[in-house]
Amino acid sequence: MAEQRAEGDDEGVRAAIGAGRTSLGIELGSTRIKACLIGPDHAPIASGSHEWENQLVDGVWTYSLDAVWSGLQECVAALLDDVERSYGVRPGTVGAIGISAMMHGYLALDAQGALLVPFRTWRNTSTGRAAGELTDVFGVNIPLRWSVAHLYQAILDDEPHVPQVSVLTTLAGYVHGRLTGRNVLGVGDASGVFPIDPATQDYDARMLAGLDELVTRRHPDLRVATLLPQVLAAGQEAGRLTEEGARLLDPTGTLRPGIPLCPPEGDAGTGMVATNSVAPRTGNVSAGTSIFAMVVLEKPLERIHHELDVVTTPAGDPVAMVHCNNGASELDAWAGLFGELASAVGSTASRDEVFGVLFRAALDGAADGGGLLAYNYLSGEPITGLEQGRPLVVRTPDSRLTLGTFMRTQIYSAFGTLSLGMRVLAEEGVELDAMFAHGGMFRTAGVAQRLLAAAIGAPVAVGRTASEGGAWGIAVLAAYLGAVSDQDGLSLGDYLATQVFGDAAVDVVQPDADDVRGFEAFLERYSAGLAIERAAVDAL
């Protein structure tokens, strides 16, 4: 992949834009909607973004659908403006489009496509009874955030909208459906809706039959299989942009209908693509509002673990996922506070500059956190058994409260729950050749990467595309759609290895022995201190 364009390449890029030899990826993340346009060499040409945030409404974490469409339109408009500003041409078409979004949650539509209840995101942890029963019936772990857990919990709670449900989908599937008129999901996103049978790369028929036995006791006419989107693997065409879809993305009418779309994917799948970790014995860590690790499996897990769930790559290969509801949001909050302080004393430092100073300070902090303890729990955390969260900073009287130690503790906190889940994978005998990391936390070179290596006890690689994230990943999946049509039988893994990442620079950091010992001490304190977090939930 071309890491950086040479001067004088503008004419070639302009020609590719005019000919539609580009791919557009759009990802609806937890805090930002981002669009990324890439050229034939997979290097970014232009981008656009829109900031947004989930809302806690009547005890439910949600986003309004009006915010989805206004955010998408602002994001696409910003990208088109960026292209025109940089290259003097406004694209009317692209080679292919891909839609990605945060996985899981509950988006239930009626037969006319209307939303029946507010969108319940992955962050909601109110599905404990349903997830427990389904785990027992299926014999595989069904996490609280999975779409089927939300549906079954609604059934158990006798919610009045259940008989009207005609479509159960994800946010990516919903947006894709409005753009194309097709009710489909990429296999990776679908694997967070309902378990996938690796032999068929479709929903597990045995488990669907088991669910029907449970559901028909309360709703005799309801068949869950009829509600689920069609499953497609990477490289399959998933529809074309309709006239209505084109207007939804770009009300100005510049973007024309007829553009093919790749299967809509979840942010976990696009993270795997963005880090070239779709082959067995590879894995990646994606750090954002949530933080999760994806490890491609060589063989099935031997036991059920509530810390792990099995999903798939965009090509349908089994993946063990360690998903933590709480990631970098608390770090963002502290950076905002320190940024206010900087402004109050007359500094003109940007938010990114403040973030960089704070992160680099962490390397000077005590390796074990210096007696400080922090929890980044803004919401519940299933891995540690908490239905709600309360962000905390706790210290002993003899602790060392310095900027460096404080920031190291905050970064350790972001990786604490992830480390607990990764240890379960290690106990299963799962081995890794490489762990790649991406997301905004890794923009400050050598800090979060080094501390993550200590937290998981393995080398961590970061590529130049680490901060591009899922929008770039889904743009690559859109480009793969065209590559498969040109080269029949080209696997996703081979495509990434040979055509996308063949010349990509990667920085690998080995675990530092002092950091590893320090994190071990921190994690021991972190595990014992979970009682404090539980008490805070009860008291506040």
Image: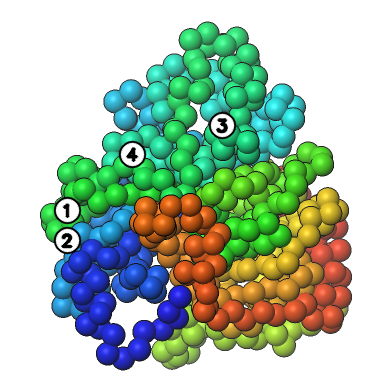
Marks 2,1: beta carbons within 8 A: yes
Tell me which numbered mark, 4 or 3, is placed earlier along the sequence: 4
Tell me which numbered mark, 2 or 1, is placed earlier along the sequence: 2
Dot 4 corresponds to which residue?
A: 177
Task: Establish if 414 lies above or below 459.
Answer: above
Q: Which mark is residue 256?
A: 1
Nearer to us: label 4 or label 2: 2
In this picture, residue 87 sits left or right of residue 407: left
Q: Which mark is residue 21?
A: none
**Identity of the amino acid at label 1?**
Arg
Dot 2 corresponds to which residue?
A: 92
The residue drawn where x is 79% and y is 69% is 457
Task: Establish if 20 lies above or below 100.
Answer: below
* x, y percent for residue 344: 46, 85
* x, y percent for residue 388: 65, 46
**Identity of the amino acid at label 2?**
Gly
